[in-house]
Amino acid sequence: MPPFAELMRMAEVQTKESQSAVQAALEERKRKEDLKKRQQEERERKERELEIKLRQKHFEDEKREQERQKRKEQEKQAIEQARQRREEEQRNHLLGKKPASKWPSSSSHTQAREDVRKTRVPLEDEDEGPSFLTREEKRQRKQDAEWKRQFAPQRRTPAAGGYGKTGRRLPGGAVDVTASVSSSDALQQSPGKTVRERLTAMPNTLTRLNVNKRDTRTIDEILQDRAKAKEAKVLDGESAKGFNDWFSS
């Protein structure tokens, strides 16, 4: 083979090898770029999922907090309503009023309406006062008379030796018991009942306040009084010989 042809063949082989190397390098570069792109897309997808989860968790936390605040507010309102109801019951008990009746329950709707009408609308023969007064004025007059009867001052009759009407019922609903049987004696008088039943059967009594007077002396005055008392206990003679109370104050 001539030298020129050999050179041409070698050049062609080298050209093919260089092209193959370039092609392989391009394919490797493309593969790396594709891999990098897929990794970037996977990372972005995970970040989006994490962001969605965090946002959803934040919304759920807010919803739970709102529900907790709502329950807390409802419990607070229930406690406040119960407190107001207890205060209203205590006030009615002190004023001597009966608790208001609940809505009439009946199987017949007509009977319920009739009961409500009778409760809300007074009969004509029950109206008091002159006929020219309106129903509201009659109701107001009747209520004023009831308040006057409840809060009218009681006449006090002089009685020897303190109270003479022990056991009478006071305007607030309590029973005037000053120096009668004590609570422990009253509980022991009913051995057949339980403690709850005996306490329920006991009347509402009055309790004397400020019976035990408070010592108004200062600490220095108390110490001085004790020192004076000790100085006064000076024994001599036969009384000193027979003294044996060494540990008393």
Image (spheres, helix red, strand yellow):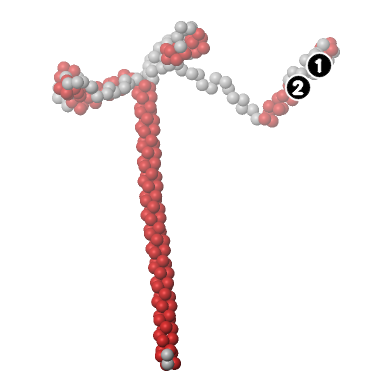
Residue at left offset 45%, top offset 9%: 193
- How many residues crowd mark 1 within 10 Å: few (<14), some (14–19), many (20+)? few
| The quarter of the displayed image where residue 236 is located | top right
Q: Residue 235 carries which label?
A: 1
Q: Could you say where residue 166 lies in the image, as x and y percent from the top left? A: 44, 10
| The quarter of the displayed image where residue 170 is located | top left
Residue at the disc numbered 2: 230
Q: Which mark is residue 225?
A: none
Q: Which amino acid does label 1 sit on?
A: Leu
| The quarter of the displayed image where residue 30 is located | bottom left
Residue at left offset 46%, top offset 6%: 192
156 w.r.t. 67: above or below: above
Q: In which quarter of the image is the N terminus?
A: bottom left
Q: Which amino acid does label 2 sit on?
A: Lys
221 w.r.t. 10: above or below: above
Residue at left offset 43%, top offset 83%: 14
| Alpha-carbon span between mark 2 and mark 1 | 11 Å
